Amino acid sequence: MTEIAPIAKPDRNRPEPLWHQAEQALRGLIADGTWTDGMQIPNEERLSTMLGVSRITIRHALRNIEDSGLLRREHGRGTFVRSSTVIAGVRGLTSFTQEMAGLGLIVGSRILERAEEAASAEVASALEIRQGEPVVRLRRLRMGNDAPIGVQTAYMPLARVPGFLALEPSASLYQTLSAHFGIAPREAREVYRVGTVAAEDAALLGIETGSPAFVVERITSDAIGPFEFVHSIMRGDRYEIRSRLHI
């Protein structure tokens, strides 16, 4: 069981609900590294005592943090930090960088390849251009809290991003597209499949060849039309999909 560091108790005079203050305090322990990936956190009763709020308040805070993917509950064992897992589900249209930040993770990205090539039939169909037209290919290793999560390959029509390869690489592709080309994402379509990791990607992700993975394809459009087609291989042990169903 992890010892909890001194933490400021929620202030009942502040306008924010107690559960929200408690949630932010607990998220802070993960963000600053006090609680590291894989650690078991104190139980609800102890957290209630430490923060000076009810167990119902603590339960509300913990449920929100768990829903965001930073915690996992194991029946009969307790609750553990899972700070390098990305949870995919109902969400807004964001970049990987924004998604990671929203989960409280430190985003990391290593460019593996930046090049111009002729669009294949698959890429041309996704981007609604002619086969053989020039596209920019951007392949990156994506990380959260220094842990590899996936390998993403993005394709963009060169006509939409002239001079892209001459730009200084940026952590956020969408920020670059907005700042230099006036491209603002409006909608995206994603398809998830279950697959396995090829040898080349396995070496980058630090896992065995043939390990389970999510294969994700995403087509993102702005007011003009599709400007990005992304093929991603996401580690099966660090990427999760959750849905909330309603009657």
Image (cartoon, helix red, strand yellow):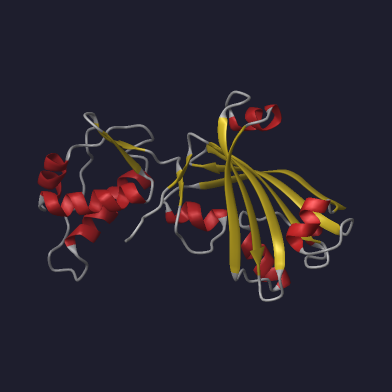
Residue found farthest to the bottom: 223
Q: Quadrant of residue 193?
A: top right
Up-down relation of residue 176 to residue 235 (above or below): below
Residue found farthest to the front: 247
Q: Observer-nearest residue: 39 or 60? A: 60
Up-down relation of residue 245 to residue 177 (above or below): above
Q: Residue at x 67, y 76 (%)?
A: 223
Q: Residue at x 16, y 42 (%)?
A: 44
Q: Observer-nearest residue: 6 or 54? A: 54
Residue 167 makes an appearance in the image: no
Residue 151 relative to residue 35: left or right: right
Residue 124 makes an appearance in the image: yes
**Residue 130 x/y as whole percent:** 86, 62
How many marks are shown on the rendered structure? 0
Residue 110 relative to residue 68: left or right: right
Which part of the image, by quadrant, shows the C terminus?
Answer: bottom left
**Residue 185 x/y as whole percent:** 61, 68
Up-down relation of residue 82 to residue 245 (above or below): above
**Residue 2 x/y as whole percent:** 25, 32
Q: Residue at x 47, y 54 (%)?
A: 101
Residue 99 relative to residue 221: left or right: left
**Residue 107 x/y as whole percent:** 52, 48
Q: Residue at x 67, y 30 (%)?
A: 198
Which part of the image, by quadrant, shows the N terminus?
Answer: top left
